[in-house]
Amino acid sequence: MPANSEDATQPGSAQTDTARVAILMGTKDGAAFLTEQLDSIATQTHPNWRLIVSDDGSTDETRKIVKRFVAAHPQTTELRDGPRRGVCANFLSLAADPAIAADYFAFSDQDDLWHPDKLGRALNWLASVPAGEPAVYCGRTDLMTTDGRVYGRSPLFAKPPSFQNALVQSLAGGNTMVFNRAAKRLLERAGPLDVVLHDWWTYQLVSAAGGVIYYDREPMVQYRQHPHSLIGSNVGSRARLVRVRLMLGGRFRSWNELNLAALRSLPETIMTAANRTTLQLFAEARQASLFKRLGLLRRSGVYRQTWLGNIGLLVGALLKRI
């Protein structure tokens, strides 16, 4: 199954149109922009959706806004309490919940705007994946300021999605992700582990299992960029300098520690043999002496999506910061 196929997002069948989609939204003090996001969900061209909102202890008007939406859409919207252990744990509490059943599942942030055909376009590709094969649709975003002004797009990545990429890079934001039932089962089996980001973990987990990832070049989400974003849009020299500082300060190394511990805890049957080898080589490279480290890193095949990112990966390896 090709990871990128422009024809795969063309209008689908009647069966796709009736597929059930569970939208998994995490909220925390998001009242400023939540109504706009909820309205963009309500106007999706794909009508068969159910929204589950996990609120992680909001102290503003977030819960009231969601309750008004529940009153307007009582058959399709649910509000529940989150685990109150941060954004990642909140989303994974939804993704790993076996009681949430549907044909497909979509992560949703609380402050973006969805293109009306976001779900429809994703489902048209997902429907082309054989039943039982884990699959994730994701893609680029249009970038907008907090006041709703669009000013650019997230980077266009050209290298294929893979586990070798997922080990060292989060390909796309969770706000773009839609995945099938087989991918949801993987998230359930893994459980709500201690990882860095729910979207990065979803990419790592599904690719580790030999699943297929589709990276859409056409943005279906307007992503509201906040100054305090953990990773952000990766656009511009300032964003790249932030990443350099994170690497030199050891942040990426500590993130890798968390992710590697989670991957190692998975049942052996989840990960393919080839990806278990890649994981072992990368883990050994992080601890080895300099020349052995570089050799193991090369053998692991890990890579980032841009030449500058790969230079940063090499520098990080030299400084033992990966």
Image (spheres, rainbow, N blue to C red):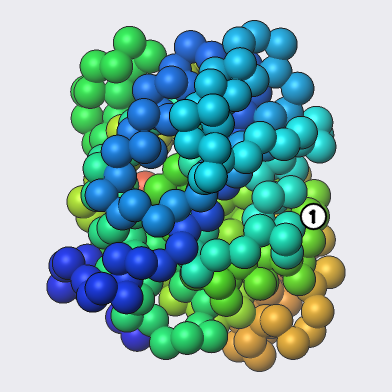
Residue 34 located left or right of residue 190: left
Q: Nearer the viewer, residue 213 or 90?
A: 90
Residue at screen point 22% across, 23% down: 151
Please determine whether, in this image, residue 179 is positioned above or below residue 94: below
Mark 1 residue type: Leu
Residue 183 appears at what percent x and percent y?
57, 70
Residue at screen point 54% across, 37% down: 74
Q: Nearer the viewer, residue 95 or 238?
A: 95
Please determine whether, in this image, residue 104 is positioned above or below residue 29: below
Residue at screen point 54% across, 28% down: 71
Q: Residue 236, located in which quarter of the rendered image?
A: top left
Residue 95 located left or right of residue 180: right
Quadrant into which the N terminus falls: bottom left
Q: Residue 191, located in which quarter of the rendered image?
A: bottom right
Whether residue 268 is visible, yes or no, is: yes
Count of number-bearing discs: 1
Residue 212 appears at what percent x and percent y?
44, 76
Please determine whether, in this image, residue 226 is positioned above or below residue 37: above
Residue 168 located left or right of residue 162: right
SS at circle 1: loop
Residue 238 appears at what percent x and percent y?
40, 23
Residue placed under numbered mark 1 in the picture: 193
Task: For label 1, count other residues whose C-alpha is less than 10 Å away and answer few (under 14), some (14-19) or many (20+).
Answer: many
Residue 50 appears at what percent x and percent y?
51, 49
Q: Residue 59, located in which quarter of the rendered image?
A: top right
Whether residue 290 is visible, yes or no, is: no
